[in-house]
Amino acid sequence: IQGGTITSYHFSCEVCRMLEDLAHLLSQLWLSGKMAVEPKGLEKWVGSAYLFVESSLDKVVLSDAYAHPQQKMAVYRALRTALAEIGGSPDVLQMLKIHRNDPQLIVQLRFCGRQLCGRFLRAYREGALHAVLQGCLAAALALRSVPLQLELRAGAERLDAWLADEERCLSCIFDQKPDRLCDEELAELEDAFQNLTCGSGSQGGDVEVAPAPTPSEKPPLPPSSGQTFLFQGQPVVNRPLSLQDQQTFARSVGLKWRKVGRSLQRGCPALRDPALDSLAYEYEREGLYEQAFQLLRRFVQAEGRRATLQRLVEALEENELTSLAEDLLGLVNPHGGVA
């Protein structure tokens, strides 16, 4: 009996270990599938697609423009700005590599988030991406217009034929997992882009290219040394926005950050309503401070040295946020002078 008991005990332990191993294997399979969970508890949805971009003008060969040393950054910035406006931050919609395939450019994209990928597909289907990208490339290449032909593929699937079936398109993109990290060339371009937008200056007009202005608007110029503007009748020295300005704004603006964003968007295409919606969704868990901070961060990234104190103060005044403007300007009191 004792021997039988011991045998049964060992048998039970072996079964338990087998069940534990099976449970671990099933857990790993589950985590590697559609329901993988990120640290914040959000469903991790990652997929990949290729965006084919070609100009219908014979004189504009985008693959040649991207290969040209003096135009490469301008083309990169145009693609980056257009995708940021439609899809949100690079953490959500990322360019992994830009392939030259004369006369086309083929952009490998990484999507993170099913809902935001769906938003990108709707913007693509409705022509919003087409319009924004045309404007950005026209500005980048100093042309009146650059008519484009776009095509979206995921693996062997040509998604343009299935845009009305969003679920099928999402499934195709989800099935194509990214096969690489961000290309070294794009990483270098991004570093150079960040240096420009942080106010380090540029080496020539071919690099520092603004998003395309609307016909009725001209892009504001970077502030010259000693340039001033009036606030409540007092001259204030204009300058590019600093990190401290962004933090002060984010601490105090509260729910009105979107209204300020709409005021800024008139001179900054990168802050149009889809971009504001993307910021609101993407940073909802982090709260109002992060949403407001990322708004100005996007503004500075898109506008570079043209993202000035004057433009922000005017947007604040327009939305009756005078006290916040005073904080940014360092006024001692509403009737005092500049500190």
Image (cartoon, rainbow, N blue to C red):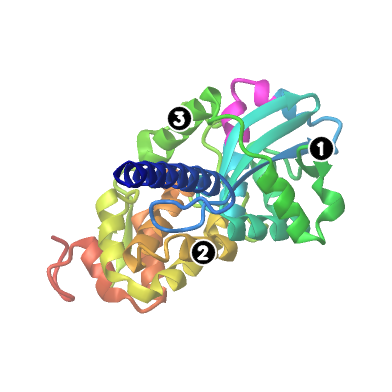
The C terminus, quarter of image: bottom left
Give the residue type at disc 2: Leu
Camera-nearest label, 1 or 3: 1
Give the SS element for disc 1.
Answer: loop
Gap in angstroms between the C-alphas marked 1 and 3: 34 Å
Numbered badge on residue 156: 1
Give the residue type at disc 1: Ala
- For marks 2 and 1 on the same chain, the one whose residue lies earlier in the sequence: 1
The residue that appears at 59% across and 63% down in the rendered structure is 274
Give the residue type at disc 3: Ala
Give the SS element for disc 2.
Answer: helix
Magenta residues span: 65-76
User: Which residue matches tag 2?
Assistant: 276
Few, some or many residues within 10 Å of mark 1 (<14, 14–19, 20+): few
User: Which residue matches tag 3?
Assistant: 192
Give the SS element for disc 3.
Answer: helix
Residue 180 x/y as whole percent: 58, 29
